[in-house]
């Protein structure tokens, strides 16, 4: 199966000319994929290949907010529009993410 791992990118101010990532922590898609494969292969006999890892610009999320709100229809549509249609699953990283250990 194929998975996309994408950070959420938003406009950094009201001019809507520059962007920033909502997740300010380290983002290592290969390490995340390795961890997913370790878990899924052993437990479900499923292995993952990496799809898109580029940031997803979600212009419906304001930088001053606390991140995406699943009750906000405009944000849900904007996030869904960034799903990678060539993969089985797209995972978005809206907040600080860390590389799993172990």
Image (cartoon, rainbow, N blue to C red):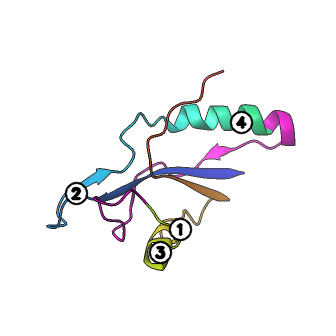
Q: Which secondary structure lies at badge 1? A: loop
Give the mark toward the camera: 4 or 1: 1
Q: Which residue corresponds to mark 1? A: 70
Tell me residue 29's x, y (percent).
52, 39
Q: Which of 35 and 62 is in front in this view?
A: 62
Give the mark toward the camera: 3 or 4: 3
Tell me residue 6's x, y (percent).
48, 51
Residue in view at x 39 percent, y 45 percent:
23
The quarter holding residue 45 reads: top right
Q: Which residue corresponds to mark 2? A: 12
Q: Do the residues labelled 1 and 2 touch (CB within 8 Å)?
A: no
Q: How far is disc 3 from disc 4 in space, using C-alphas?
A: 32 Å
Q: Which secondary structure lies at badge 4? A: helix
Q: Are marks 1 and 3 in contact (CB under 8 Å)?
A: yes
- Earlier residue among tags 2 and 4: 2
Residue range (magenta): 41-67
Residue in view at x 53 percent, y 68 percent:
70
Q: Do the residues labelled 4 and 1 touch (CB within 8 Å)?
A: no
């Amino acid at each position: 199966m194929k998975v996309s791992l994408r950070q959420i990118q938003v406009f950094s101010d009201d001019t809507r000319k520059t962007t920033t990532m909502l997740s300010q922590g380290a983002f290592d898609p290969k390490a995340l994929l390795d961890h997913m494969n370790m878990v899924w292969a052993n437990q479900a006999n499923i292995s993952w290949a990496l799809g898109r890892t580029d940031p997803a610009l979600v212009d419906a999320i304001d930088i001053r907010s606390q991140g995406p709100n699943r009750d906000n229809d405009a944000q849900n549509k904007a996030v869904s529009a960034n799903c990678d249609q060539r993969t089985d699953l797209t995972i978005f990283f809206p907040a600080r993410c860390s590389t799993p250990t172990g």
